[in-house]
């Protein structure tokens, strides 16, 4: 086991919306992703998804409201919840989710 430099991992990510798996803890994956623009509306049928903002501002659009996360804030999208992520400027996010989650959503 080696320690991981999050800053170095961020530098490895060249494309938006392409998560990089950083840690695996049992059946959970911690992914790092750069976000800019809007992602498609989707849901994860059987898994919750945790978003934690490291840099920037992330908006999570839900059916009836919008959650705005700033650096150091997090939010859990419960399983089966239709959602869309977006960021006006480059934003770096930790995604914590089940190892069998489809990162593109359903």
Image (cartoon, rainbow, N blue to C red):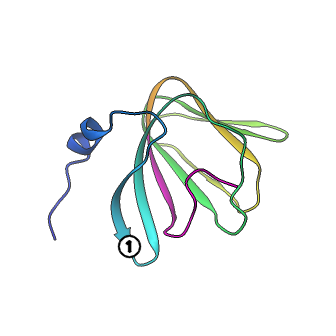
Neighbours of disc 1 within 10 Å: few (<14), some (14-19), many (20+): few
Residue ranking furthest to the top: 88
Please state the horizontal and vertical placement of residue 41, each as a whole percent of the image. Answer: 72, 41
Q: Is residue 69 magenta?
A: no
Please state the horizontal and vertical placement of residue 68, each as a whole percent of the image. Answer: 63, 34
Q: Quadrant of the N terminus?
A: bottom left
Q: In the figure, 97 relative to 13: above or below?
A: below
Image position of 77 (left or right of 20)? right
In the image, what residue occupies the spot 83% across and 41% down? 63
Image position of 43 (left or right of 100)? right
Please state the horizontal and vertical placement of residue 19, each as a whole percent of the image. Answer: 43, 47
Image position of 62 (left or right of 23)? right
Residue ranking furthest to the right: 64
In the image, what residue occupies the spot 54% across and 70% down? 100
Residue ranking furthest to the bottom: 26
Residue ranking furthest to the left: 2
Tell me the residue that label 1 is attached to.
25
Q: In the figure, 22 relative to 60: above or below?
A: below
**Over which residues does the magenta segment extend?**
93-106
Q: Quadrant of residue 38?
A: top right
Q: Please count the marks in the image.
A: 1
In the image, what residue occupies the spot 79% across and 37% down? 65
Please state the horizontal and vertical placement of residue 67, each as a whole percent of the image. Answer: 68, 38
Q: Quadrant of the C terminus?
A: bottom right
Q: In the figure, 36 relative to 39: above or below?
A: above
Helix, strand, or loop for circle 1? strand
Image position of 89 (left or right of 106)? left
Q: Nearer the viewer, residue 106 or 63?
A: 106
In the image, what residue occupies the spot 72% across and 53% down? 43
């Amino acid at each position: 086991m080696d320690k991981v430099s999050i800053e170095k991992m961020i530098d490895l990510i060249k494309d938006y919306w392409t998560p990089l798996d950083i840690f695996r803890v049992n059946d959970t994956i911690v992914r790092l992703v750069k976000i800019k623009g809007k992602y498609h509306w989707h849901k994860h049928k059987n898994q919750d998804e945790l978003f934690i903002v490291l840099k920037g501002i992330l908006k999570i659009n839900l059916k009836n409201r919008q959650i705005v996360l700033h650096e150091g804030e997090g939010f859990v999208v419960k399983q089966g919840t239709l959602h869309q992520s977006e960021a006006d400027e480059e934003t770096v996010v930790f995604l914590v989710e089940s190892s069998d989650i489809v990162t593109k959503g359903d």
